[in-house]
Image: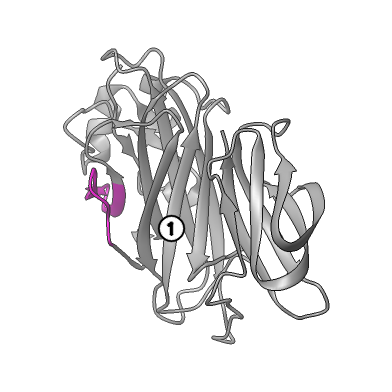
Amino acid sequence: MKIKMLLFTATIGLGYLSLSSYSAGPSASAGHVAVSGCGSTGSCHGAKNTATAVAIVIKDGVTTITNNKYTPGKKYAITITGTNSSKTQFGYQFSATKGTSSVGTISNIPTGSKSATASGITVVEQSAPIASAFGLLITFDWTAPAAGNGPVTLSAAVNAVDGTGGTGNDVYNTTQVTLTESTTGIQTVVRESIAVLFPNPATNVLNIQLKTHAKANAAILNSFGQKVKELTLNQGITSTDVAELPAGLYYISIATDGENVSQTLSFIRQ
């Protein structure tokens, strides 16, 4: 089936999603969505389905933000991931909102993606179906709004399709992250990565190489923040079996032994 653009309505901040059936792109008119038959349930694409895993990864430098806080005016790297074991083509949409308005500024949009307006909200989405045997992986920048805006909501939808031109086999899912405004203006960030992960995505074995320390403790977390594995890292390369983990996005939190240095990295189990 062909990609159908995912349209965030003005109520996206409240968790509602409309899916437009217009292949030319999302209409700025919510009325057009109603005419297309999609409505707030996304009926033209079927119901949301967890067979498509969706995640939003937020990074400050090389450090993944896990405390769900933003510093006003700071630029963050946003990565949208989507996986589906039976599909190899994807569409997506992302927005950053407060109530019914866009907040912050999106920049460095990659080739194959574009900025658009949906019901008055600025979104980033695919320009054409994105083909990948390993799932969707899109990164761009988002600059947080000025001080005083308070909580903001980052929303993402990923639609996994089969490229046949219809919507009957679409498998889409959505996710949201609410960020609260940091009142201190200070966040501890590791500017140089203390470890590297490879291969990423990983299928059977994930290798973790410590770059600057002799020993560290690590925990692997799933996209819900649940700990699924613990391990000790030694100088050089430590390999760990990830074959039994379900496909999807994972975080690995690393804390150096005896030093107040920590870092969280992300990887995809495919």
Q: Is residue 85 magenta?
A: no
Residue in the foreground of this view, choosing between 268 and 203: 203
Q: Residue at x 34, y 25 (%)?
A: 38
Q: Residue at x 56, y 42 (%)?
A: 268
Residue 125's quadrant in the figure? Answer: top left
On the question of residue 117 being in view, the answer is yes
Q: Is residue 35 left or right of residue 185?
A: left
Q: Residue at x 53, y 77 (%)?
A: 191
SS category of the residue bearing label 1 = strand
User: Residue flagged by tag 1: what amino acid is it?
Assistant: Ile
The percent position of residue 188, horizontal first and vertical second, equals 61, 80
Q: Residue at x 39, y 74 (%)?
A: 145
Stretch in magenta: 108-124
**Mark 1, residue position:** 78
The percent position of residue 33, horizontal first and vertical second, equals 28, 31
On the question of residue 103 being in view, the answer is no
Q: Residue furthest front?
A: 236
